[in-house]
Image: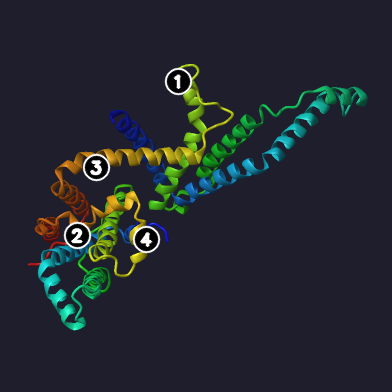
């Protein structure tokens, strides 16, 4: 199998391309939702881990089995993907108005797309890494130096000590949104 | 580090200029130039010998005509033709093909401005991207001679080898990456606060640049 970072970089690049196609005015609304999702999942990580871990052990009856990791990884991934999907599909939070003309507009679309790509792909990667890759175990022994460096900077681990940091850009963006 | 930043700023100014030029000229013109430049470059790389043979044949035809091949003694004309040196030899082949490509590229750039109407050449983001690509082609065209003009003797780029487009783009990407790494070196000591500041700054700049945003209804 190839390096694991290729898989997540590919996901990230696809999100960047979507961002370029949609433009940063639409992408900012999705960014807000992703940041809120990250805040919720990191802020309530401990109680969720405890509750789901206990539920998994009760259900599967295994003290040292891999079921709790699989369940937690699945739970976080599905919740995060669900929130992100809601942020992209249907009625979404939008910033009204026209984007800046090129080249600034294009550059901003690229930057916001890169942020969204990093947040989405990085978070998906984190919830595999944190629970021991319940889906991709063969990957683990093949980590490159680049992958090990990237793992240290995956989004949920950025503000592990203070998850409230995720809400700061959200609050500022909302103020700008309300002021119009 | 400072040298790298200076080079990167120069590169960004250069590419911004061509991006802006691409925006002004529009998508159709820039696309036409990019296609012609790429195809002619590939064609000259693959079938350059045919172009060289054609040039030598035309030169030989002119030699034949000026030596009296059509009016005077045919024997003398053939003798002059066989003793005449080739216009393009093995040693000047690459330089000749490079000049041919430069001519094709510049003619395409000028001709698209005249032939394709301004209204038919849409101004969009792709026009900027193609403008930047054409900027790389322009660098390939003019850098060797400008290098020869400004560099100290002995450090010039050989005209007949030109500049490899892919290696130039690769060097540009590596330079950009080095600067990103250097900037990361400045942010990393600040820890998560530094990342938060950068993330927030980008999002705020993007949100503030939206024009004519609808105000929330009270």
Do the dots labelled 3 and 2 sit on one chain? no
Q: Secondary structure at mark 3?
A: helix
Residue A128 in the image: above or below residue B116 = below
Q: Residue furthest left?
A: B218
Q: Secondary structure at mark 2?
A: helix
Q: Which mark is nearer the camera, 3 or 1?
A: 3
Question: Tags 4 and 2 in contact by the CB under 8 Å rule?
Answer: no
Q: Which mark is nearer the camera, 1 or 2?
A: 2
Chain at numbered mark 3: B
Q: Describe residue B103's horizontal placement relative to residue A137 as left or right.
A: right
Q: Secondary structure at mark 4?
A: helix
Chain at numbered mark 2: A
Q: Secondary structure at mark 1?
A: loop
The residue under label 2 is: A156
Q: Describe residue B8's horizontal placement relative to residue A178 as left or right.
A: right
Give the number of the disc on residue B151. Answer: 1
Question: Tags 4 and 3 in contact by the CB under 8 Å rule?
Answer: no
**Measured Cα–Cα span from mark 4 to mark 2:** 18 Å
Q: Where's residue A142, x and y in %?
A: 37, 57
């Amino acid at each position: 199998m190839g390096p694991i970072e290729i898989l997540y970089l590919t996901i990230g690049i696809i999100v960047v391309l979507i961002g370029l196609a949609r433009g940063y005015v639409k992408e900012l609304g999705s960014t807000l939702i992703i940041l809120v999702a990250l805040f919720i999942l990191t802020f309530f990580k401990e109680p969720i881990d405890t509750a789901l871990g206990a539920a998994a052990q009760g259900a599967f009856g295994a003290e040292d089995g891999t079921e709790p990791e699989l369940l937690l990884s699945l739970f976080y991934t599905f919740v995060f993907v669900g929130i992100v999907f809601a942020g992209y599909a249907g009625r979404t939070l939008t910033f009204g108005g026209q984007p800046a003309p090129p080249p600034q507009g294009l550059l901003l679309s690229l930057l916001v797309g890169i942020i969204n790509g990093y947040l989405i792909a990085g978070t998906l990667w984190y919830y595999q890494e944190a629970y021991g890759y319940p889906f991709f175990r063969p990957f683990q022994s093949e980590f490159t130096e680049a992958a090990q460096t990237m793992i240290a900077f995956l989004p949920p681990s950025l503000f592990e000590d203070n998850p409230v940091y995720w809400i700061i850009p959200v609050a500022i963006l909302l103020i700008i949104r309300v002021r119009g | 580090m400072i040298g790298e930043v200076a080079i990167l700023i120069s590169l960004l100014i250069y590419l911004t200029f061509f991006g802006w030029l691409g925006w002004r000229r529009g998508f159709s013109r820039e696309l036409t130039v990019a296609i012609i430049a790429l195809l002619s470059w590939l064609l000259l790389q693959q079938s350059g010998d045919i172009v060289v043979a054609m040039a030598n044949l035309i030169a030989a035809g002119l030699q034949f005509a000026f030596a009296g091949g059509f009016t005077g003694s045919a024997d003398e004309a053939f003798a002059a033709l066989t003793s005449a040196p080739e216009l393009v030899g093995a040693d000047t082949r690459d330089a000749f093909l490079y000049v041919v490509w430069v001519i094709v590229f510049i003619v395409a750039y000028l001709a698209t401005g005249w032939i394709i109407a301004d209204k038919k050449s849409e101004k969009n983001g792709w026009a900027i991207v193609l403008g930047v690509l054409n900027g790389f082609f322009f660098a390939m065209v003019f850098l060797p001679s400008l290098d020869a003009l400004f560099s100290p003797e002995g450090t010039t780029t050989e005209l007949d080898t030109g500049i490899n487009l892919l290696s130039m783009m690769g060097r540009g990407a590596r330079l950009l990456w080095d600067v990103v790494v250097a900037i990361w070196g400045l942010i990393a000591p600040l820890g998560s606060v530094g990342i938060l500041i950068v993330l927030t700054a980008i999002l705020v700049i993007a949100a503030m640049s939206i024009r004519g945003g609808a105000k929330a209804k009270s």
